[in-house]
Image (cartoon, rainbow, N blue to C red):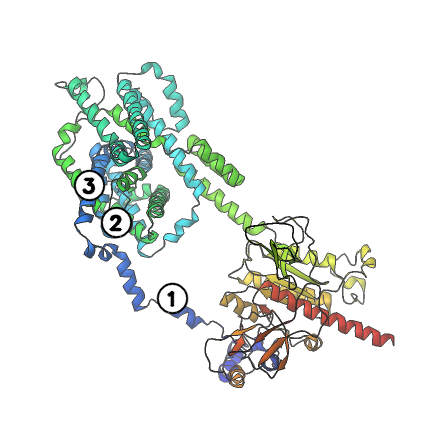
């Protein structure tokens, strides 16, 4: 409670009565609790405050230190680096370098750049990642999907601003912008935002991107000229089929390289399975198949095209590649160029991050370590920012290269440095050899790589089994990508997924619950037989004291439909929120709750209007069938299960207040009790308490007089007794907090032999045990604040308290009617 002077000031100056909320709180809640649970200690919960919240937001020195340590994870393992780790990293690094070289040059063509740009890009990822990364098994470099996105951005910018910018300038600007965005998200630890992009749109995107890549590479692999591969994939496929008669000699190289790669792959896999003792050798050979095939066709191309000018080559070759890092420079993109790229930047950044994080998490699960997603975004952002400075473009985690790296025996992220040395060797010593690489062979390599990215029918069928609606989203995304663009596909998929989520939040019905008596049955000695409490093979646990479980009354859940589920007590309703409770669905839930209650209860008193015209225009008045509602019970209590609810907003709180007011008028002069189970968030409890929930109101003395408190107590850790009187004086007449949760059994009498018996003087309801005992062999105290007796520890305690009070009210009403009759 605010100080008296501060309260008077705010009331006079601002018109705010800060103590108004305490006027409806009964002033004797603490004294009542003390009488009931003594000698157990009472407890008042302190409400969370704004200052407490602000302190939690301020970083501590330990937190800052931890942040810096996480920012440079290599510092945690570099001091333990030894010869064994070095040997494993050198072998793995050289292996991955040999794999990455042909891949990087092939993927650069997808980005509409020269093969050298792919080498620059892979070099950047290899050099930067080990400083910031948290996975030892991931390779950052060129990827088919990332390169395709760059190529599409290049095409788009050239279409909107023809001739103003070179392909290299566009690719460098895109990488710089993507790196800046990713670095910002990583440094501020905002990686969780990526979780808003669900799995299904990403899976559809990868499949769509693979199909798109195939459409662009098939004409190159077949040597078909004059095919516009920047059109929608379906148009590219149509034009390719129409131009099949124009196939050239390149087809011999492209088709042969494609099938040769698969032949080597399946042969090595066969040898791995049939010769387990040589599995690692065959796996190593399999990982180098790209290099072997590329060297083979370089040799063939050299023998065929040796001495011929570039224009007269028998089939198209890569041609001259600049030696070294001759494209290294400080990028200075113009504002106009940045403006052209900006609309397509979100899709590129999203795909780069999701592809990378998915691979890093998969590798971590496979080898038993965890990654830090935000730190991975820092590493990815740093690599993309640095890439344009050496001539590269956007890079991200490569699944194929990462799979090779882990099989090669990598020990730490430092293996990337050794793969970078291989790339440097290729750039300075092998560019003359790269001159003879057939473009059709590179196309065959790309086709081979992306075939594994297409979702197989088995996986698509699994989507259908898991969720039909998400399967539909997957199909729509793939079709949009084929007939429109990849960017549109990812936006449509994400939008549909979010819409599906919002619809589920807004329109998923809650459940009205009923009670079932449950028993536990256990088999003995591995034998199972008929259920008999005296059987030697089956034991009925807690035969005398069955426990209550709560199942939906509508019987549409997964439980046995033959079970007898009954209402816990006439006039008591249990409602469970299935998908949370917030401003999106509060009206829907409250409408269902109100309609259900009105149909199953009757008014306490008749409505009274001096004139019929005093009735609201939209109130049709009493229904005809209400004449025969005498058999219906009065509304006594509502129990809300908040197990699926964490935070509460103002809209949903106001909805509860409005419904409480309406039901209080409906049940006047009685007051409806609102019991809450599993309210664990302190701020939610505070909000409910401020709104007048959690305790019996002092504005209805009659109802307050009929209320019998019930609490839950438990043993405490310490041996010191808390001064209950001091606790009451400390809180005085506040009795306020939004964090209470009690129930279980009702303490009534105390035996001086340190034996606390919790029982009820009210008649027992069927299956609702209200008696138990617990020895006070050590100090005990209330589990939750006694000033919020309608916030309960679980659903069972909430229902028990509601039923007990309803019984008391019915007994009192029966007694009053009997007296009136006499």
Nearer to the camera, 245 or 542: 542
Q: Residues within 10 Å of mark 2 (few under 14, many from 20)?
A: many
Q: Residue at x 16, y 31 (%)?
A: 321
**Is 579 drawn above or below residue 289 in the view shown?**
below
Specify which label sits upstream in the sequence, 3 or 2. Answer: 3
Specify which label sits upstream in the sequence, 1 or 2. Answer: 1
Q: Position of residue 609 (x, y in %)?
A: 79, 66
Quadrant, the C terminus: bottom right
Q: Position of residue 63 (x, y in %)?
A: 31, 65
Label drawn at residue 382 = 2
Q: Residues within 10 Å of mark 3 (few under 14, many from 20)?
A: some
Tag 2, which secondary structure?
Answer: helix
Q: Which residue is mark 3?
A: 91
Number of numbered discs overlaid on the protein picture: 3
Q: Position of residue 573 (x, y in %)?
A: 67, 61
Mark 3 → mark 1, Cα distance in angstroms: 46 Å
Label drawn at residue 57 = 1
**Is 438 drawn above or below residue 612 in the view shown?**
above
| Res. 121 image quadrant | top left
**Is 670 drawn above or below residue 251 in the view shown?**
below
């Amino acid at each position: 409670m605010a100080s008296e002077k501060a309260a008077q000031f705010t009331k006079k100056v601002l018109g705010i009565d800060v103590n108004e909320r305490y006027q409806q709180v009964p002033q004797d809640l603490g004294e009542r609790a003390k009488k009931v649970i003594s000698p157990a200690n009472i407890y008042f919960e302190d409400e969370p405050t704004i200052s407490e919240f602000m302190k939690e937001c301020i970083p501590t020195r330990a937190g800052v230190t931890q942040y810096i340590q996480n920012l440079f994870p290599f510092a945690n393992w570099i001091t333990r680096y030894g010869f064994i780790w070095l040997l494993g990293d050198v072998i793995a690094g050289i292996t991955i370098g040999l794999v990455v070289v042909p891949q990087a040059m092939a993927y650069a063509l997808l980005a509409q750049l020269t093969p050298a740009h792919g080498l620059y890009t892979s070099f950047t990822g290899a050099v930067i990642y080990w400083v910031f990364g948290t996975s030892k098994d991931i390779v950052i470099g060129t990827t088919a999907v990332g390169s395709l996105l760059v190529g599409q951005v290049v095409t788009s910018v050239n279409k909107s601003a023809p001739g103003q910018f070179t392909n290299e300038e566009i690719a460098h600007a895109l990488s710089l912008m993507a790196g800046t965005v990713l670095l910002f998200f990583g440094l501020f630890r905002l990686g969780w935002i990526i979780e808003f992009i669900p799995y299904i749109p990403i899976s559809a995107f990868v499949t769509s991107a693979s199909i798109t890549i195939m459409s662009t590479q098939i004409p190159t692999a077949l040597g078909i000229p004059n095919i516009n591969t920047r059109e929608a994939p379906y148009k590219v496929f149509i034009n390719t089929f129409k131009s099949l008669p124009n196939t050239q000699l390149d087809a011999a190289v492209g088709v042969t390289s494609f099938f040769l790669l698969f032949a080597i792959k399946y042969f090595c896999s066969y040898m791995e399975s049939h010769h387990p003792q040589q599995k690692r050798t065959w796996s190593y050979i399999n990982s180098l198949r790209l290099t072997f095939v590329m060297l083979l066709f370089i040799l063939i191309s050299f023998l065929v095209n040796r001495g011929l000018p570039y224009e007269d080559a028998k089939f198209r070759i890569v041609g001259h590649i600049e030696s070294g890092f001759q494209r290294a420079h400080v990028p200075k993109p113009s504002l106009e160029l940045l403006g052209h790229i900006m609309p397509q930047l979100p899709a590129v950044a999203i795909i780069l991050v999701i592809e990378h994080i998915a691979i890093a998490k998969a590798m971590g699960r496979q080898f038993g370590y965890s990654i830090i997603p935000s730190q991975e975004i820092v590493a990815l952002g740093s690599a993309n920012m640095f890439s344009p400075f050496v001539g590269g473009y956007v890079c991200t985690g490569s699944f194929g290269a990462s799979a090779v790296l882990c099989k090669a025996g990598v020990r730490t992220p430092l293996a990337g440095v050794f793969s970078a040395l291989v790339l440097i060797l290729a750039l300075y010593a092998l560019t003359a050899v790269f001159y003879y690489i057939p473009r059709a062979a590179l196309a065959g390599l790309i086709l081979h790589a992306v075939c594994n990215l297409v979702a197989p029918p088995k996986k698509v069928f699994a989507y259908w089994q898991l969720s039909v609606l998400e399967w539909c989203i997957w199909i729509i995304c793939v079709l949009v990508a084929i007939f429109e663009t990849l960017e549109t596909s990812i936006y449509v998929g994400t939008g549909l997924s979010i819409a599906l989520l919002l619809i589920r939040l807004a329109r998923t019905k809650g459940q009205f619950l009923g009670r079932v008596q449950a028993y536990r049955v256990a088999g003995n000695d591995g034998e199972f037989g008929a259920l008999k409490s005296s059987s030697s093979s089956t034991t009925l646990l807690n035969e005398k004291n069955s426990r209550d479980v709560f199942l939906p009354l509508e019987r549409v859940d997964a439980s046995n439909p033959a079970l007898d589920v009954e209402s816990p007590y006439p006039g008591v309703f249990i409602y469970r929120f299935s998908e949370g409770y917030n401003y999106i669905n509060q009206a829907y839930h409250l409408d269902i709750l109100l309609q259900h209650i009105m149909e199953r209860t009757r008014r306490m008193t008749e409505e009274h209007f001096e004139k019929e015209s005093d009735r609201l225009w939209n109130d049709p008045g009493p229904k005809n069938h209400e004449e025969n509602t005498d058999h219906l019970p009065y509304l006594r209590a509502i129990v809300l299960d908040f197990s699926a609810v964490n935070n509460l907003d103002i809209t949903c709180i106001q909805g509860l207040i409005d419904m409480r007011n309406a039901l209080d008028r409906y049940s006047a002069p009685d007051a409806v009790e609102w019991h809450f189970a599993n309210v664990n968030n302190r701020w939610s409890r505070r909000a409910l308490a401020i709104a007048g929930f959690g305790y019996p109101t002092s504005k209805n003395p009659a109802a307050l007089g009929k209320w019998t408190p019930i609490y839950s107590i438990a043993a405490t850790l310490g041996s010191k007794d808390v001064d209950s009187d001091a606790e009451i004086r400390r809180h005085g007449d506040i009795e306020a907090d939004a964090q209470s949760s009690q129930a279980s059994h009702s303490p009534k009498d105390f035996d001086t032999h340190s034996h606390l018996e919790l029982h009820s003087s009210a008649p027992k309801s069927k299956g609702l045990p209200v008696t138990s005992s617990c020895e006070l062999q050590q100090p005990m105290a209330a589990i939750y604040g006694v000033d919020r007796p309608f916030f309960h520890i679980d659903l069972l305690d909430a229902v028990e308290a509601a039923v007990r009070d309803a019984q008391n009210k019915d007994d009192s009403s029966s007694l009053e009617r009997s007296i009136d009759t006499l």
